[in-house]
Image (tube, rainbow, N blue to C red):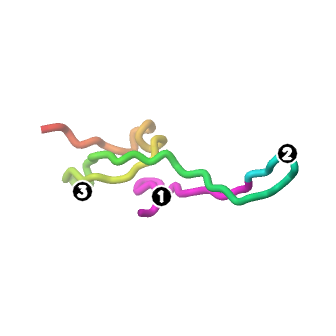
């Protein structure tokens, strides 16, 4: 499954681990994604959303029944 926010499109970033001896290996920073039941086109649906979109109010959570 893709590590990508369905609202803003935020995805993994790449970079390097660098040791004290300057050994360089690849690494990834993954976004903090949460599975949320949200309103999409007027219907509740489970989507994967980053926590920044949740905090900023870009996602409308579906009411519990």
> Which dot marks residue 60?
none
Tell me, yes or no, whether the two marked residues, 3 and 2, touch with CB atoms within 8 Å. no
Name the secondary structure under disc 3.
Answer: loop
Identity of the residue drawn at 19% across and 38% down: 63
The quarter of the image holding the N terminus is: bottom left
Crowding around mark 1 (Cα neighbors within 10 Å: few <14, some 14 to 19, many 20+) is some
Crowding around mark 2 (Cα neighbors within 10 Å: few <14, some 14 to 19, many 20+) is few
* Mark 3 or 2: the one toward you: 2
Name the secondary structure under disc 2.
Answer: loop
Identity of the residue drawn at 55% across and 51% down: 30
Residue placed under numbered mark 3 in the picture: 41
> Which dot marks residue 3?
1
Crowding around mark 3 (Cα neighbors within 10 Å: few <14, some 14 to 19, many 20+) is few
Residue placed under numbered mark 2 in the picture: 20
Is 43 in front, or is 31?
Answer: 31
Dividing the picture into quadrants, the one containing residue 62 is: top left
Left or right: 1 as drawn, with respect to 38: right
Cα separation, mark 1 vs mark 2, equals 30 Å
Residue stretch rendered in magenta on the structure: 1-16
Q: Earlier in the sequence, mark 3 or mark 2?
A: 2
Left or right: 7 as drawn, with respect to 12: left
- In percent of width and height, residue 7 lies at 42, 54
Magenta segment main secondary structure: loop
């Amino acid at each position: 499954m893709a590590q990508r926010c369905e609202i803003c499109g935020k995805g993994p970033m790449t970079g390097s681990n660098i040791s004290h001896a300057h050994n360089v290996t690849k690494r990834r920073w993954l976004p903090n994604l949460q599975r949320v039941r949200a309103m999409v086109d007027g219907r509740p649906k489970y989507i994967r959303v980053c926590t920044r979109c949740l905090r900023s109010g870009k996602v409308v959570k579906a009411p519990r029944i």
